[in-house]
Structure formats: structure tokens, C-alpha cells
Amino acid sequence: MKISREKLGQVASDLLRILDREGFRNTKRIKRSVEQAIPVTGREQDSVVIGWRPSNHGTLALDVSYVIQNGPEEIIDIPLDVKINPELHYTTIILKSDFRIPSYDNFEHDSFGNFIQSKTLEIYKWGDLRPEIASICLLCC
């Protein structure tokens, strides 16, 4: 799936709105919702999925992914993925889009021609990460 500037902006905005609606104002609160898939209002096939995933040096990262699906079992794409590693005190944000995003490192292309880009931040608290996600919304609007 080609991820346009408009689509990425909508995804980032939806992610913030869902986390706010669910009361996820800090990382501690997000941790209590592990292994949940929260539906995106108005987009039946989209959800925000929260779970623990293996990370560096034998640690786990809290993975907050915006998932676009084609039915309950078929994932089409993950245009925005936030990996919070509280043990190693960093977060990596991975984005997919059909355009380069300033300050993000391009490390691959997918089969649709999207740039897969990442940025690692030396922060791991959701309150500190929220402005970074909000800046994606501003960049894409």
C-alpha cells in the first residue's frame, strides 16, 4: 500500500487521538494495556496494537503500532510503529511513506516504493514522545 503524506498525517493524528481517548498519558498506563488491539473509530480495518517485542541486549520494547488490515487476520501495512525501550532509555519510531521525512533515516524501501524511515530518540516516556508524533501530523497536513 502506498502511504501518502496525507495518509501518514491521518495515521499519526489517529494514533494520538486514540491514545488520548484511552487515557494513555504516560508509558506506565500504556504498559497496562499490552496485547490489546484498539479499533480506530471510523476506519473498521485499522487498529492500534500494543505489545511487548524483543529488543536490543535481551530487553523488551513496548511496541505501539498503527495497523492497517484487510479483515481480522490479514495485515496490509504498519505505517507507524513506536518502539519504547524503558530499560535502555530510548525509543525508535519507524515510519513508512512515499516521501522522505526530515530528521528520519531512510533504511529501506518496501514493494510499494515507500521509504521505510526511522528515528531513535533518547527518551522513553510517552509524555516526552507525544510532541514527536504531533510533529509528524504538522509535517503532513
Image (cartoon, rainbow, N blue to C red):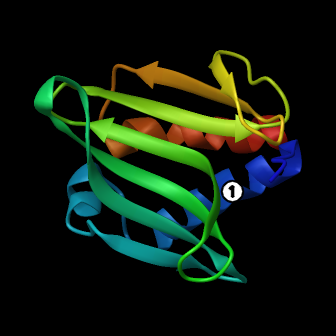
Q: Position of residue 60 (x, y in %)?
A: 19, 41
Q: Quadrant of the C terminus?
A: top right
Which residue shows up at 72% across the image and 83% down it? 42
Residue 75 vertical placement versus 82 (above, below): below
- Residue 135, image quadrant: top right
Residue 125 vertical placement versus 52 (above, below): above
Q: Position of residue 83 (x, y in %)?
A: 38, 40
Provide the residue designation for mark 1.
11
The amino acid pointed to by label 1 is Val
Q: Secondary structure at mark 1?
A: helix
Residue 118 vertical placement versus 85 (above, below): above
> In the rendered image, is residue 6 in sight?
yes
Q: Position of residue 116 (x, y in %)?
A: 66, 31
Pick the front one: 64 or 15: 64
Q: Position of residue 16 (x, y in %)?
A: 56, 57
Q: Is residue 92 left or right of residue 72?
A: left
Q: Is residue 45 left or right of residue 58?
A: right
Query: Local crowd at mark 1 within 10 Å, few (<14), some, or many (≥20)?
Result: many
Pick the front one: 124 or 117: 117
Which residue shows up at 47% across the image and 76% down it? 38
Which residue shows up at 29% across the image and 60% down it? 30
Q: Is residue 99 left or right of residue 44?
A: right
- Residue 37, image quadrant: bottom left
**Residue with the most extreme front position:** 111
> In the rendered image, is residue 141 in sight?
no
- Residue 100, image quadrant: top right
Q: Is residue 111 left or right of residue 124?
A: right
Pick the front one: 1 or 38: 1
